[in-house]
């Protein structure tokens, strides 16, 4: 840029625009598969809507349907947060997201950097340019593939990529919830309110510019019981009737006036039980639900979401309800049919999401992950939540890595290497409805046995409870699971998937729902996990190998495990390999578990 400011040039394999959950997981998954990634984020923190700037917790399929919690990178992140950040402090949460990127040597991270321009040639993006506000530096990035995870789809107007805005007619996709006539209205954006109960009365004086709501009717009869579960003031929402990008600043100003006025109503207009409650935080960055959506080779529809259409190119799944916030937002009366505010339909099964929804129909090397995938407005109302966005991001990053390794476009990768993409995702602990993970040849040729019970389900290719079957092994601590060979074999490593209670995630029923955001827990799960760390997870285990002389040696041990999915190298020759979940509660060592003496394991496998 010829304006006297510094310009830095970068050449990489994958450029990811946007550091929300979708972009973060896209970058992480591609980098972990050996791709050089540049991640451009226009904010000072990562996480998008779940960052400290907006503070919406992560919801997904598992929030509404039993045992459908998203795994892979998502579960890795949530378990790390539960382990390191039990009070759900947002500074710690931001640092966990940032730390995930810092651990990856294949990622170059540009924070506070906004994508401003793009160059295309012959239907391909050649480069993008971003401006970094903190350093007053232009960054020029060339890459093989570009992934737009910006939410607002900034590369669409910059590259000519096809996109859509608004609500489709019923006729276009044959959707029950479609309109008689299409329009450009969208879901609105919200400012969340975070309050905290104290042990003493707290007075509140609103700013002079806040709106005044003297009674419930003035506040459109919105639900605002402090002790009602999942209130969270989501209905402080506007922007759906205008331009959800161009009008963001003036919409934010209106939302601030409403939000501070709502808290004034709670404190000073009527008895709402808020005398001892203190206003801790109101966001100044709106949490946006919808703007531009790209058009891919396939558009996900309401029928696909409700009927769980099977796809040969499935790479992700959703399960959150159809949750369509109508454009009027706060202005709609809350006493009528969810305030004529929400159009909902619960889902009972996970629905597949095809890879064809994750790349552009007309720009050859453009992919996307997040709330901008190729979906109708109604299908999008389910797929937009961050749990689903996360698994979509991991799928996009893995697929980008396969495309780059083979030197082909995303479309060609989907046509020619889809099973490789799917195998890589399932190997990385991602669930794909209708698919089973391949078992390693070394595990299949060995004799699998255990000191207690039946462990055959450890290699059935399904690493979670699903559709009425446990698919796991209930073992006893200090009892081994063993692979034996008829001759000395080289073992590269082991794969382990432990039970972390995939039924725990929900905001409904959580007693701390109003005091905290991000990663809330259902108090009545089958493993009795409350707002804390999963009690069922194996904390201490040991991997032992039998050497050629018949002696057992410890090859790997972790006494402080806090993850569900573990894959480690061993690089050793062995006649046998065994995994022993350890408990020394009754010994002098007093090494305890997280609360369960049972070792529930979905996969132990050698390769």
Image (cartoon, rainbow, N blue to C red):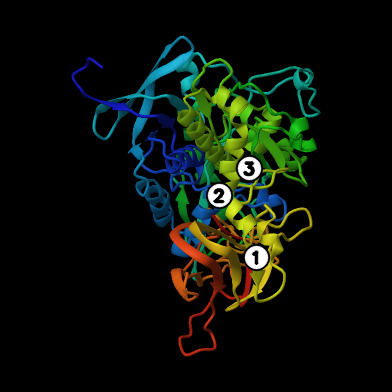
Dot 1 and dot 3 residues touching (CB under 8 Å): no
Dot 2, crowdedness within 10 Å: few (<14), some or many (≥20)?
A: many
Q: Nearer the viewer, residue 555 or 134?
A: 555
Residue under numbered circle 1: 448
Say what secondary structure mark 3 lies in.
loop
Q: Position of residue 227 (x, y in %)?
A: 64, 61
C-alpha gap between disc 2 and disc 1: 26 Å
Image point 69% across, 29% down: which residue? 300
Dot 2 and dot 1 residues touching (CB under 8 Å): no
Dot 2 and dot 3 residues touching (CB under 8 Å): no
Residue 594 position (above or below residue 486): below
Residue under numbered circle 3: 219
Q: Nearer the viewer, residue 266 or 536?
A: 536
Q: Position of residue 571 (x, y in %)?
A: 43, 58
Q: Nearer the viewer, residue 564 or 343?
A: 564
Disc ID at residue 145:
none
Q: Quadrant of the N terminus?
A: top left
């Amino acid at each position: 840029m010829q304006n006297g400011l510094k310009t830095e040039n970068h050449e990489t394999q994958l450029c990811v625009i946007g550091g929300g959950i979708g972009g973060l997981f896209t970058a992480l998954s591609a980098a972990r598969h050996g791709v050089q990634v540049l991640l451009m984020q226009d904010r000072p923190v990562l996480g998008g809507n779940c960052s400290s700037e907006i503070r919406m917790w992560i919801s997904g399929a598992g929030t509404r349907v039993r045992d459908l919690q998203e795994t892979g990178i998502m579960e890795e992140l949530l378990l790390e947060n539960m382990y390191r950040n039990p009070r759900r402090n947002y500074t710690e949460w931001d640092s966990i997201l940032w730390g995930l990127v810092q651990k990856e040597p294949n990622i170059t991270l540009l924070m506070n950097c906004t994508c401003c321009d793009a160059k295309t040639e012959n239907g391909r993006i050649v480069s993008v340019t971003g401006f970094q506000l903190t350093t007053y530096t232009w960054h020029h990035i060339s890459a093989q593939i570009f992934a737009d995870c910006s939410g607002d789809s900034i590369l669409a107007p910059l590259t000519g990529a096809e996109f859509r805005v608004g609500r489709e007619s019923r006729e276009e996709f044959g959707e029950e919830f479609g309109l008689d006539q299409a329009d450009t209205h969208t879901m609105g954006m919200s400012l969340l309110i975070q309050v905290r109960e104290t042990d003493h009365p707290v007075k509140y004086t609103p700013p002079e510019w806040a709106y005044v709501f003297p009674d419930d009717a003035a506040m459109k009869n919105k639900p605002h019981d402090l002790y009602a579960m999942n209130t969270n003031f989501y209905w402080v929402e506007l922007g759906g009737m205008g331009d959800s990008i161009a009008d963001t600043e003036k919409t934010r100003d209106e939302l601030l006036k409403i939000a501070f006025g709502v808290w004034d109503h709670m404190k000073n207009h009527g008895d709402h039980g808020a005398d001892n409650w203190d206003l801790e935080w109101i966001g100044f960055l709106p949490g946006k639900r919808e703007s531009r959506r790209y058009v891919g080779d396939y558009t996900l529809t309401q029928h696909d979401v409700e009927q769980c259409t099977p796809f040969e190119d499935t790479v992700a799944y959703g399960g959150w309800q159809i949750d369509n916030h109508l454009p009027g937002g706060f202005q709609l009366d809350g006493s009528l049919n969810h305030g004529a505010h929400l159009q909902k339909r619960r889902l009972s099964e996970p629905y597949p999401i095809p890879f064809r929804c994750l790349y552009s129909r007309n720009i050859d090397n453009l992919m996307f992950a997040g709330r901008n995938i190729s979906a109708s407005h109604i299908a999008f109302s389910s797929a937009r939540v961050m749990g689903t966005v996360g698994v979509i991001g991991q799928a996009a990053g893995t697929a980008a890595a396969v495309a780059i390794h083979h030197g082909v476009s995303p479309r060609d990768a989907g046509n020619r290497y889809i099973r490789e993409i799917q195998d890589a995702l399932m190997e990385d602990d991602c669930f794909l409805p209708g698919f089973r993970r391949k078992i390693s040849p070394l595990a299949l040729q060995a004799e699998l046995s255990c000191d207690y019970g039946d462990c055959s389900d450890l290699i059935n290719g399904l690493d979670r409870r699903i559709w009425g079957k446990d698919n796991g092994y209930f073992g006893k601590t200090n009892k081994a699971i063993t692979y034996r060979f008829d001759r000395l074999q080289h073992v590269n490593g082991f794969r382990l998937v432990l039970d972390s209670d995939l039924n725990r995630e929900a905001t409904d029923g959580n007693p701390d729902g109003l005091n905290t955001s991000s990663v809330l827990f259902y108090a009545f799960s089958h493993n009795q996990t409350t707002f804390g760390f999963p009690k069922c997870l194996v904390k201490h285990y040991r991997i032992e190998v039998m050497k050629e002389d018949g002696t057992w040696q410890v090859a790997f041990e972790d006494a402080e495990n806090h993850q569900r999915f573990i894959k480690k190298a061993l690089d050793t020759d062995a006649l046998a390999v065994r995994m022993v979940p350890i408990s020394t509660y009754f010994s002098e060592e007093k090494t305890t578990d997280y609360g369960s003496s049972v070792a529930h394991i979905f996969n132990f496998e050698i390769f």
